[in-house]
Amino acid sequence: MSTHVRKGATFKTGQKQLLTMSEGDYDYLIKFLALGDSGVGKTSFLYQYTDGKFNSKFITTVGIDFREKRVVYKSSGPDGVSGRGQRIHLQLWDTAGQERFRSLTTAFFRDAMGFLLLFDLTNEQSFLNVRNWMSQLQMHAYCENPDIVLCGNKWDLEDQRVVKEEEAHELAAKYGIPYFETSAADGQNVAKAVEVLLDLIMKRMERCVDKSWIPESAMQSNGHSAKQQAADEMGTEKGKCSC
Ligand SMILES: Nc1nc2c(ncn2[C@@H]2O[C@H](COP(=O)(O)OP(=O)(O)OP(=O)(O)O)[C@@H](O)[C@H]2O)c(=O)[nH]1
Ligand SMILES: [Mg+2]
């Protein structure tokens, strides 16, 4: 049985669309969102990922912004062999870390499929606040256990580092999420963190579709496949996504 629904299917949360398999020149549109305290490097991280550039000047984000990038995702099958590449259009939402924008930025959490949660390795408070950001995610994301990658950023500032690698790994393990030490300045692990998040999303999607257990032959009613319908229904109520 194929693990992919056909183009045109959507995964929704309420009325919002998280992921679209489009008829355009890409197969999937996927929305990620970067969050974390002000100054941890969210804007710099995304700028490094999309443009391979870094700006040392701090221009705080006002409200919300986004960047885009096209990538090709190759899933590996059960035998470890890569399948056909999927063309992914990544929409990367960049939120303001400042408290005064909180109600605006959390309103965008529901629209995102995956999250890059950043803290600053040179700032203890930003690490302590990871717990608060996790609670915010549980409250406002499309389900209670969304896919998240934790990033300890500013890895290049070795002499100013105050957060130990082990304690960051422990915290990530407690939440059951991957952890990477990143640098928006030199690019260390930036692409890797995004790739791992994308992999989690694609695997979640395949599990969601597989869960409908509907054979291809039973599809195609009224222009909508039963499998697609099942996929649409997966995320319609917050917290109900079991995949
Ligand atoms: N050395 C170093 N500096 C960094 C790194 N990432 C960000 N910075 C610097 O840290 C400052 C804040 O970075 P931003 O990317 O603007 O932080 P932000 O998280 O987007 O902040 P808000 O928009 O206020 O939420 C800037 O001066 C960046 O140049 C990094 O990995 N290494
Ligand atoms: Mg910013």
Image (cartoon, rainbow, N blue to C red):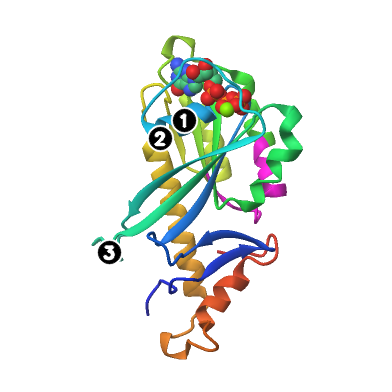
In this view of the protein, which residue sits in the foreground, 127 or 18? Answer: 18
Rendered position, 139 above or below 228: above
Query: In this view, which residue lies farthest toward the top?
Result: 159
Q: Could you tell me how far apart the alpha carbons at marks 1 and 3 are, in whole angstroms?
A: 29 Å
Q: Nearer the viewer, mark 1 or mark 3?
A: 1
| Rendered residue at 58%/43% (across/down) | 175
Quarter of the figure with residue 50? top left
Disc 1: which residue: 45
| Rendered residue at 51%/62% (across/down) | 20
| Rendered residue at 61%/53% (across/down) | 145
Q: Nearer the viewer, mark 3 or mark 2?
A: 2
Residue 11, visible in the rendered structure: yes
Q: Amino acid at mark 3?
A: Gly
Disc 2: which residue: 49
Rendered position, 241 above or below 45: below
Residue range (magenta): 133-148
Where's the N terminus, which quadrant? bottom left
Measured from the top left, where is residue 81 in percent x and y? 23, 62
Does mark 3 have its CB less than 8 Å from ligand 1? no
- Label 3 or label 2, whichever comes before in sequence order: 2
Disc 3: which residue: 83
Does mark 1 have its CB less than 8 Å from ligand 1? yes
Rendered position, 116 above or below 187: below
